[in-house]
Amino acid sequence: MLVLGAGDMGSAVAHALHAAGRPVAIQDDPAPAHPRRGMAFADALWDGCATLAGTLARRADDAQALGAILAAREAIAITALPLESVLAAGSWAALVDARMRKRATPPDRRGLAPLAIGLGVGFVPGGNCDIAIETSWEALGRVLRSGEALPLRGEPRAIAGVGRERAVYAPEGGIVRTTHRIGDAVAAGEPVMELGPHVLRAPLAGCLRGLVRGGAAVQAGAKVLEVDPRGDPALCFGLGERPRRVAEAVREALAEAIARP
């Protein structure tokens, strides 16, 4: 199984498929800028390995290493090899596009594997995927074999009554600089990150649930940090409810598709 995207959604999907006994690989950029790193395998692309909810991901820097990790099935393989190289390196039963690009129209993933599944906005079964999975809270985990996924809702779900104002977005593109860590307690207005000439501050008190890794390149408008106002660092790690429910829907859809004659 091949999952595109090492953010919280793609990581939860890979975690669920690995738990079901399937060999799984994740493909992403070499230095990904995912904010919710405590809920993802993304740091494995920086550090060589990462653990999420008791499951290990190991980085594969070439096709041979990718094949060895998949064959052992002890860990999830994660790689920054180009997609075409990853596709050529194995025989993939399914591909799951979990990149969650929101406003960007996803490319057609059909034909890259016997089954192509797209998560969330922009995916159309029969158009650019075989099956789409809803990622919006109002239809979370719904499996679509026709129609199209719901459009972008525009506003994140509130946490402890706090919505979009808990996040900070990049005022310009550039390289992130920070010494903070996921789960750190912060005060409202505390400097957390530098981006070019800008000092980005915590918008409210709480714990850092999202924090793009220092050294990562981000585009203007990208989410770079997020504060959980509940103040419990444990809530910044592990499988989030939304990714977990979407991952379970992917697992069930795959099992049903494979069981069909």
Image (cartoon, rainbow, N blue to C red):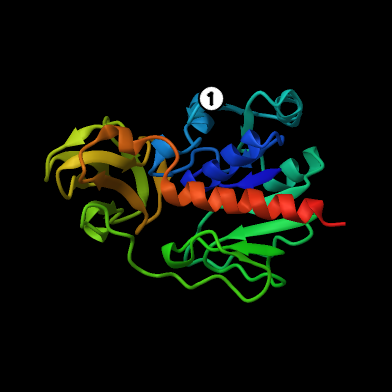
Quadrant of the image containing the N terminus? top right
* 206 up-or-down from 44: above or below: below
Rendering coords of residue 167 (x, y %): 27, 53
Rendering coords of residue 129 (x, y %): 69, 64
Apparent side of residue 17 relative to residue 228 in the rendered image (left or right):
right
The residue carrying mark 1 is 49
Depth check, front residue: 145 or 45: 145
Depth check, front residue: 32 or 175: 32
Residue appearing at x 48%, y 31% in the figure: 53
How many discs mark residues in the rendered view? Answer: 1
Rendering coords of residue 90 (x, y %): 80, 39
Depth check, front residue: 254 or 186: 254
Residue farthest toward the right in the current orientation of the protein: 261
Q: Is residue 60 visible?
A: yes
Residue appearing at x 27%, y 58% in the figure: 158
Residue appearing at x 53%, y 25% in the figure: 49
Secondary structure at badge 1 equals strand
Apparent side of residue 33 relative to residue 120 in the rendered image (left or right):
left
Mark 1 residue crowding within 10 angstroms, few (<14) / some (14–19) / many (20+): some
User: What amino acid is found at the position of numbered circle 1 in the picture?
Assistant: Cys
Quadrant of the image containing the C terminus? bottom right
Rendering coords of residue 250 (x, y %): 62, 52
Q: Is residue 196 visible?
A: no
